[in-house]
Image: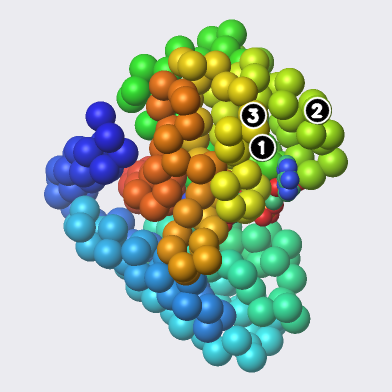
Amino acid sequence: MTIKEFVAASKAALAEEISALERKPHLVIIQANDSPASDAYVRGKIKDCGEVGARATLCLLPPTVSEEELLAKVDEYNRDEDVDGLIVQLPLPKHISEAKVKLAVTPEKDVDGFHPLTTFIPCTPRGIIDYLTEEGFPFVGKNAVVLGRSEIVGKPMAKLLLSKHCNVTVLHSRTSEEDKAFYIAHADLIVVAIGKLGFLDNRFQYKKDAVIVDVGINRNEEGKLRGDAIPDLPVALQTPVPGGVGLLTRLALVKNLVIAAKNR
Ligand code: NAD
């Protein structure tokens, strides 16, 4: 199944699940930046909620908002009985501590999965695992390589793959090129999340039955969205950019929202 087909089928199932709920799940998105990329992500999240019959509210704050005012808003929605999921769109203005804000969202509503006590799986790794599971990827004992060690993708991805019994290797900016080539050549699954246009290319060798999951979002010289891997590498499956992990991430957010609503 292509990612688009998987997302469409999953959304149809979610819509059915939500239609049976008395109270429609309600997501609140706080946005305190004026980044066009964030505007597009937020529009996507609101559209997804609408498509499955969930409610979404955007709380737009000016980038000049103080940390105190933003935390007060978070607190207000934390207490609001009518709100199931609460997310704060990143990046935040420089004068606001991202760490403080992530800790401020109550774990029960933290559908982004950023709070240390949250029970929600962060959306990008969750979306990837759900898709690989649907594709029948045989996780147990497989060599998985995660490129990148960020808090929102690389680290939770590695942890999840470990929980699926993969042999997990995390490669990062301080890994030598020689070691990267070695681990990539032996990988059954490569999840690349480093934000470097076309980093995975033909200078590396791949197992022919390997799976490449491309998380990267980069703009090429023509301003078009492209991933961390060049297209059509000689492997069994490679997720496209655009139309790949971004869609899976959005789907996972809606899934987390439904869980949050059902938990309450
Ligand atoms: P980040 O940008 O915070 O950090 C980059 C990571 O890559 C670091 O851990 C660093 O060690 C590693 N790295 C940098 N250069 C490297 C190199 N040459 N070799 C190996 N590792 C290297 O990471 P992030 O927030 O996970 O974002 C990574 C990419 O994924 C970005 O392009 C981002 O836009 C994209 N992203 C996409 C989605 C989605 O839904 N599709 C979600 C989150 C992030």
Tell me the kind of residue under disc 3. Answer: Phe
Ligand 1 is within 8 Å of the C-beta of the residue at disc 1: yes
- Using the image as rendered, state which of residue 94 and residue 181 is in the foreground: 181
Tell me the kind of residue under disc 2. Answer: Glu
Which of the two labelled residues, at mark 1 and mark 2, occupies the earlier sequence position?
1
Residue 14 rendering spot, x and y as whole percentages: 23, 43
Residue 224 rendering spot, x and y as whole percentages: 43, 63
Q: Residues within 10 Å of mark 1 (few under 14, many from 20)?
A: many
Q: Residues within 10 Å of mark 2 (few under 14, many from 20)?
A: few
Disc 1 + disc 2, Cβ < 8 Å: no
Give the vertical position of 80 relative to 49 (above or below).
below
- Using the image as rendered, state which of residue 179 and residue 262 is in the foreground: 179
Q: Residue at x 51, y 43 (%)?
A: 230
What is the basis of the colouring in this image?
A: rainbow
Q: Is residue 254 left or right of residue 103?
A: left
Q: Nearer the viewer, mark 3 or mark 1?
A: 3
Disc 3 + disc 2, Cβ < 8 Å: no
Q: Residue at x 79, y 34 (%)?
A: 177
- Using the image as rendered, state which of residue 109 and residue 248 is in the foreground: 248
Residue 41 rendering spot, x and y as whole percentages: 42, 66
Residue tagged 3 = 204
Residue tagged 2 = 178
Give the vertical position of 32 relative to 47 (above or below).
below
The secondary element bearing badge 3 is classed as loop
Examine the image and state in which quarter residue 99 appears: bottom right
| Distance between mark 1 and mark 2 Cα atoms | 14 Å
The secondary element bearing badge 2 is classed as helix
**Residue 158 tag number:** none
Residue tagged 1 = 147
Q: Residue at x 25, y 29 (%)?
A: 1
Furthest-front residue in view? 203
